[in-house]
Amino acid sequence: MNSLTAILLVGIFFGLAYCIRLLRSLHRKVIQRSERTTREIAAATKELQAANWQSYRQSEAFTQLLSLLKFDAVVPPTRSWAASPDLLLTLAQLVRAHKPKLVVELGSGVSTLIVAKAGARKVVSIDNSEEFAEKTREIIRDHKVRGVEVRVAELTNHASGSDWYDLSKLTDLKRIDLLIIDGPPGSKNPQARKPALVEFISKLSPKAVIVIDDVNRDGERELAEGFAQALPNHTLTIFSHEKGTAVIAPK
């Protein structure tokens, strides 16, 4: 074997070694990418299944709601900013079970209609927006519901440090049998609804029921726990609704 042949063989050897190393590296990358893609597909599938299940549950709750209550006009859209059907169904059931004389609601909308249709004697719904308040009034008029007052209380500085409803609009409210807290908007400020505890705890009747939406968020969960601690004869129940619902009711 001459030197040229030896050089060629060495070159071929190192070339093959390099190709093998390159193929191994490529194989590892393909496997890693494949595993990552598999995980992504699995996560996306799980998310899609959860969304489908949630949609089914909401459709089921809405169907039950339509069967439970008789409506004289079109029911407004639910979910997103509005209350979800699972919460609305729970509100209807609570009204029928506890028969509240006075319901106070923070944040008006389709829930105002449901509570009134379920049989509440008087409903006072507080909204910080005249625009949304008027939309709720239109819903109430369309469905020919009585005993509902939609009251506008603009957000002003509160002692808690958060903007909250104008207290002068709430002075006449007392012996509340059902308090529904779904306002003011709390997606950007976790403490936005916190003043409800100090401002309403003395306005509740002994057998009052408190319902808090959005307890999947930390601020609303803390508010629910605060009400439960302030009312030792009540029990806190968290429902796994779309947005999470807390019900603080007498034991």
Image: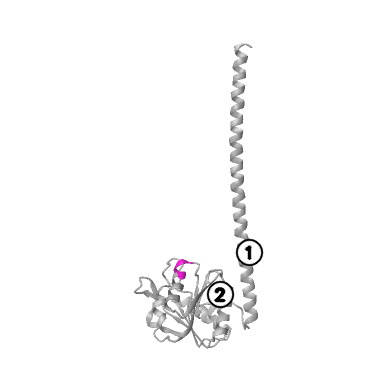
Which percent across, then down, holds residue 160?
36, 72
Residue beneath the point at 59% across and 16% down: 7
Displayed quadrant of residue 226: bottom left
Compare residues 95 and 229 and report the one nearer the observer.
Answer: 229
User: Disc 1 on helix, strand or loop?
Assistant: helix
Q: Earlier in the sequence, mark 2 or mark 1?
A: 1
Which percent across, then down, holds residue 171?
39, 85
Residue beneath the point at 59% across and 51% down: 40
User: Disc 2 on helix, strand or loop?
Assistant: helix
Residue type at mark 2 is Leu
Residue type at mark 1 is Asn
Over which residues does the magenta segment extend? 217-221
Q: Is residue 128 visible?
A: no
Q: Residues within 10 Å of mark 2 (few under 14, many from 20)?
A: many
* Residue hosting label 1: 52
Q: Is residue 98 visible?
A: yes
Q: Which mark is residue 3?
A: none
Quarter of the figure with the N terminus: top right
Residue beneath the point at 61% across and 42% down: 31
Which percent across, then down, holds residue 219?
44, 68
Measure the C-alpha gap from mark 2 to mark 1: 18 Å
Q: Residues within 10 Å of mark 1 (few under 14, many from 20)?
A: few
Displayed quadrant of residue 66: bottom right
Is 81 positioned to the left or the right of 2 in the image?
left
Against 27, is 188 above or below? below
Against 32, is 202 above or below? below
Would you say the magenta stretch is mainly helix, strand or loop?
A: helix
Which percent across, then down, holds residue 20?
61, 30
Question: CB of mark 2 within 8 Å of CB of mark 1?
Answer: no
* Residue hosting label 2: 87
Compare residues 121 and 144 and report the one nearer the observer.
Answer: 121
